[in-house]
Image (cartoon, rainbow, N blue to C red):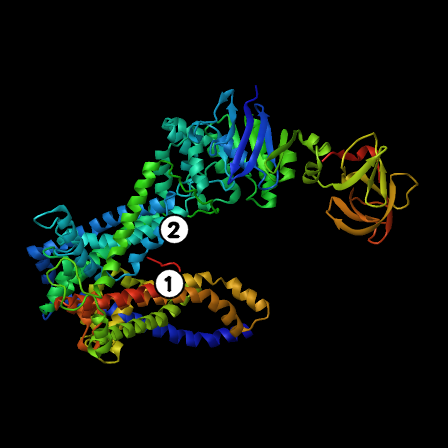
């Protein structure tokens, strides 16, 4: 049995349902991410697991035991809060030792464990510092150490990186993942940032409006989104509503693309990197001539907006030195779309 | 180059302004305090400690000293318990009608102590309305309780001063971060442990700050001890006695001791406050109010809230109702029976009767004006400049905060009962301006705090933004500086007017026939058994206090 099992979780807030029949299994040692836009119910679900919220229906199992009715303080589930929630009137040592003191751990043991976890998060010698003297990143580490020192069975992380600046966020992302791997601790991570989710997770659950839409590995989610929401939310995509007939899809008023197989659905999604651009293209059913409306340089990548009759396509190519003349705004180009790269979506 | 020229040009007026400010502050605050010190220590032959020795050796003086400290401590404890529990009740639980109760609980802060004392005497005194009602209802031979001495003073203090705790603790509760509470639970802390390890540390700075305020007000309290204290003698009443008997050296020594008591408490607890003070760096999530599900508890709380509201508004109602009692009709009956507008007619038709009211209004306005004129440049220097005089100015403007009102009055007498260089060789004692100046000295710290907060809100980037958008100095001042600073200033001015309009303690020491304030007129009316007229005076003050308080968004209490 999985370490954490969520069974038919339903939660209402002021008559509005924020979790609708959520069923999830989270395995031991897994880095599992709840991903979704704000207000999708992911944080609520995390708080249900932590025990701060009691669901209206359904049950939470930890190690096969039904803990739905257990108070938060009895669950021994570690949690790192979005704003870290450090005790502002205690120094670093007292913050980390808080839980151990509540448990009445012998003083020697307490000191040893605090020291061990301070080292783990790279904050040796910070014991006496006040919380207000720490940077955001350091506070984050203290919060992490404070949870880990209790050696919980699972670690819950509620958007822990959202209060850090971009560069620090990248660094902490890697450190967090490293610590998780080293300890092998089962981790549930809540975020609205797809990059965080894709780079860190073993598995991702995508949420929208209280529903769990899709569960899978980062690649499954990215390459085989189950519907238009997942396709658009994770990574950039060209999403069009279309009519499918005889293995062909018509989008807009003039564009008809050949599909690789007979399929049914309402939408097609084409990732921007799956469209190829050529200055002079050949005749082919999936080739269309368009006009370059704008070019954005990302450094590694180039992003084009290309107008084909009444449709606008986003195309991304690698940005490297070539002998060819670069494409310019206003030029016409041929877009080539491989039928195997077109994903048909039912909803 | 041009910048340099500009700076040189602006240094001269600033120096003059600083010198003027220092002249006023030293002359009206520091010099009088030092003068009292010297009066207490010097006699014709030089240095002497005889006054202090007398206080220590005389039983009555020792008693007053002890009583004062006991009164201060008990006031802190009682107000702490009442104010803190009420703050939790209203801001931690889902109490029915909590918004209205919150507003009502703030009422007593704008009411002058003297008026509360008289309202309480009319309600709970020997022949008070509540006392007699209870006696009749319970069928007792004698009245059920005696409202005098320490008990009575504490009752009044509880009513007038729980607000300090209530406001500060309420703010502290609102600043508790919900995530921190949850972090505690997540780490295994029980509800009790959460209370002791999270909630208490969060509200501790507020408790300390309120206790300082309450202690200093408690030991400096004069109205309650002088009117209902009876045999319970405290320093403030002894000081008046010494002054009345013209033992100015003794009064000076008592003032110095009272000031020391006040300052020691302030110093010790300020030190402790700074030690436990903390900054929360990341913005927290507001706590969720705890639901009360138990129907019995909920009903009990509703009843409790109702009784509480009654206790709070009863004195105010009493003042208004009794102000309509027909003169000479309420003598031996429990309840007044005949009502009329006579008291108000008398008040507004006889200029002799109206004069104290006019005086008080005028003096309150003058006080507010003086406060503004001194507080604005002081705050400006404290907040916006790096002047070397800054710390000295801050010390001077805040000094009166630690000096009880009766002490300020004695300081004024010692300093200005003869011509002084600070007053242009005039004797201030006996002059009309003496009272507004004394009010000004005692209320200056409050005004400076208000203006300082206002100026701190005036972030320099706003001014820079305005200039970058093409506004000139005048436009920037009118469209950016004024809108930001004005609400605080108006609030501050209103607070000063409210606090000075019903002032009693300093007035007793310093008033003359020419500037008799409304508080003295009220006391005189009471002694002439003209309770209706006294209450009409009180009603006027209450009306002005409430009207003024409407302008005050948030009342600073420290």
Q: Chain of mark 2?
A: B
Along the viewing direction, whichever of B96 and B23 lies nearer the viewer: B96
Task: Provide the residue designation for mark 1.
Answer: B550
Q: Which SS class for mark 2?
A: helix
Which tag, 2 or 1, sits closer to the chain's start? 2
Please rate how many residues cluster around mark 1, counting C-alpha atoms within 10 Å: few if below 14, some from 14 to 19, many from 20.
Answer: few
Residue B46 relative to residue A197: left or right: left
Q: Position of residue A27 (x, y in %)?
A: 58, 23
Check whether the beta carbons of the residues at disc 2 and disc 1 lie within 8 A of each other.
no
- Asked if residue B25 lies left or right of residue B139, the reply is right
Q: Which type of secondary structure does the marked residue at label 1 adopt?
A: loop
Mark 2 packing: few (<14 Cα in 10 Å), some, or many (20+)? few
Q: Are marks 2 and 1 on the same chain?
A: yes
Q: Quadrant of the N terminus of chain A?
A: top right
Where is mark 2, residue-wise? B99
Drawn side of residue A44 relative to residue A311, left or right: left
- Image quadrant in which the C terminus of chain A is located: top right
Q: Is residue A156 above or below residue B218?
A: above
Residue B33 visible in the picture: no
Residue at 34% x, 44% y is B89
On the image, the x and y values in percent for residue B513 come to 17, 77
């Amino acid at each position: 049995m999985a370490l954490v099992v969520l069974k038919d979780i339903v939660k209402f807030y002021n008559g509005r349902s924020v979790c609708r029949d959520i069923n999830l299994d989270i395995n031991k040692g897994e880095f599992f991410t709840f991903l979704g836009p704000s207000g999708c119910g992911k944080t609520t679900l995390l708080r249900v697991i932590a025990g701060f919220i009691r669901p209206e229906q359904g049950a939470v199992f930890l190690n096969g035991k039904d803990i739905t009715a257990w108070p938060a303080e009895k669950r021994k589930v570690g949690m790192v809060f979005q704003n870290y929630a450090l005790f502002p009137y205690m120094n670093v040592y007292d913050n980390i030792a808080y839980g151990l003191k509540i448990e009445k751990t012998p003083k020697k043991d307490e000191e040893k464990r605090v020291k061990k976890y301070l080292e783990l998060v790279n904050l040796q010698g910070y014991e006496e510092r006040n919380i207000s003297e720490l940077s955001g990143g350091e506070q984050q580490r203290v919060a992490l150490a404070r949870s880990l020192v209790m050696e919980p069975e699972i670690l819950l992380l509620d958007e822990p990186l959202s209060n850090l600046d971009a560069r620090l966020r990248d660094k902490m992302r890697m450190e967090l993942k490293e610590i998780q791997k080293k300890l092998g601790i089962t981790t549930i991570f809540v975020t609205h940032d797809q990059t965080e989710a894709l780079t860190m997770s073993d598995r991702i659950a995508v949420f929208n409006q209280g529903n769990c839409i899709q569960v899978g590995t980062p690649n499954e989610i990215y390459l085989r989104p189950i519907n238009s929401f997942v396709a658009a939310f994770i990574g950039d995509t060209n999403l069009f509503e279309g009519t499918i007939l005889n293995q062909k899809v018509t989008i807009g008023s003039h564009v008809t693309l050949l599909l690789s197989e007979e399929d049914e659905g309402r939408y097609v999604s084409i990732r921007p990197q799956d469209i190829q651009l050529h200055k002079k293209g050949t005749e082919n059913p999936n080739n269309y001539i368009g006009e370059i409306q704008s070019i954005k340089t990302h450094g590694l990548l180039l992003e084009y907006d290309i107008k084909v009759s009444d449709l606008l396509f986003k195309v991304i190519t690698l940005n490297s030195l070539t002998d060819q003349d670069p494409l310019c705004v206003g030029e016409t180009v041929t877009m080539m779309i491989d039928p195997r790269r077109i994903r048909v979506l039912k909803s | 180059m041009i910048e340099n020229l500009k700076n040189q040009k602006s240094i001269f007026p600033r120096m003059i302004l600083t010198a003027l400010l220092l002249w006023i502050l030293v002359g009206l605050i520091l010099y009088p305090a030092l003068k009292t010190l010297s009066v207490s220590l010097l006699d014709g032959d030089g240095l002497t400690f005889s006054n202090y020795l007398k206080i220590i050796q005389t039983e009555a003086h020792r008693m007053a000293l002890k009583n004062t400290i006991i009164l201060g401590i008990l006031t802190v404890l009682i107000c702490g318990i009442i104010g803190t529990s009420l703050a939790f009740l209203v801001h931690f639980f889902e109490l029915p009608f909590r918004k209205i109760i919150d507003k009502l609980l703030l009422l007593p802060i704008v009411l002058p102590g003297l008026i509360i004392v008289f309202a309480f005497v009319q309600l709970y005194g020997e022949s008070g309305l509540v006392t007699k009602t209870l006696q009749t209802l319970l069928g007792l031979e004698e009245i059920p309780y005696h409202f005098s001495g320490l008990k009575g003073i504490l009752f009044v203090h509880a009513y007038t001063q729980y607000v300090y705790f209530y406001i500060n603790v309420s703010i502290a509760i609102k600043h508790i971060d919900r995530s921190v509470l949850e972090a505690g639970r997540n780490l295994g802390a029980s509800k009790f442990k959460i209370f002791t390890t999270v909630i208490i540390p969060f509200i501790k700075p507020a408790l300390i700050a309120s206790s300082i305020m309450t202690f200093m007000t408690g030991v400096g309290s004069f109205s309650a001890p002088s009117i209902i204290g009876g045999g319970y003698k405290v320093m403030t009443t002894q000081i008046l006695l010494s002054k009345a008997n013209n033992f100015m050296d003794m009064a000076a020594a008592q003032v110095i001791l009272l000031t020391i008591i006040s300052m020691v408490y302030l110093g010790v607890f300020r030190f402790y406050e700074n030690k436990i003070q903390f900054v929360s760096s990341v913005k927290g999530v507001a706590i969720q109010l705890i639901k009360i599900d138990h129907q019995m508890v909920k009903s009990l709380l509703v009843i409790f809230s109702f009784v509480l509201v009654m206790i709070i508004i009863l004195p105010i109602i009493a003042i208004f109702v009794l102000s309509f009692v027909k003169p000479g009709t309420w003598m031996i009956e429990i309840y007044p029976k005949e009502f009329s507008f006579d008291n108000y007619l008398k008040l507004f038709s006889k200029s002799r009767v109206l004069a104290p009211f006019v005086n008080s209004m005028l003096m309150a306005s003058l006080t507010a004006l003086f406060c503004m004129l001194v507080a604005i440049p002081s705050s400006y220097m404290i907040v916006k400049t790096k002047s070397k005089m800054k710390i000295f100015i801050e010390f001077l403007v805040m000094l009166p905060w630690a000096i009880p009102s009766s002490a300020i009055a004695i300081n004024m007498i010692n300093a200005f009962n003869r011509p002084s260089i600070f007053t242009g060789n005039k004797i201030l004692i006996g002059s009309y301006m003496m009272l507004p100046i004394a009010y000004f000295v005692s209320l200056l710290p409050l005004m400076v705090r208000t203006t300082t907060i206002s100026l701190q809100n005036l972030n320099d980037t706003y001014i820079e933004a305005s200039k970058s958008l093409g506004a000139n100095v005048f436009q920037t001042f009118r469209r950016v500086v004024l809108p930001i600073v004005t609400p605080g200033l108006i609030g501050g001015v209103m607070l000063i007017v409210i606090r000075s309009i019903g002032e009693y303690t300093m007035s007793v020491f310093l008033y003359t026939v020419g500037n008799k304030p409304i508080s003295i007129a009220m006391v005189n009316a009471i002694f002439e058994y003209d309770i209706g007229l006294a209450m009409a005076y009180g009603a006027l003050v209450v009306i002005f206090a409430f009207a003024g308080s409407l302008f005050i968004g948030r009342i600073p209490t420290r």
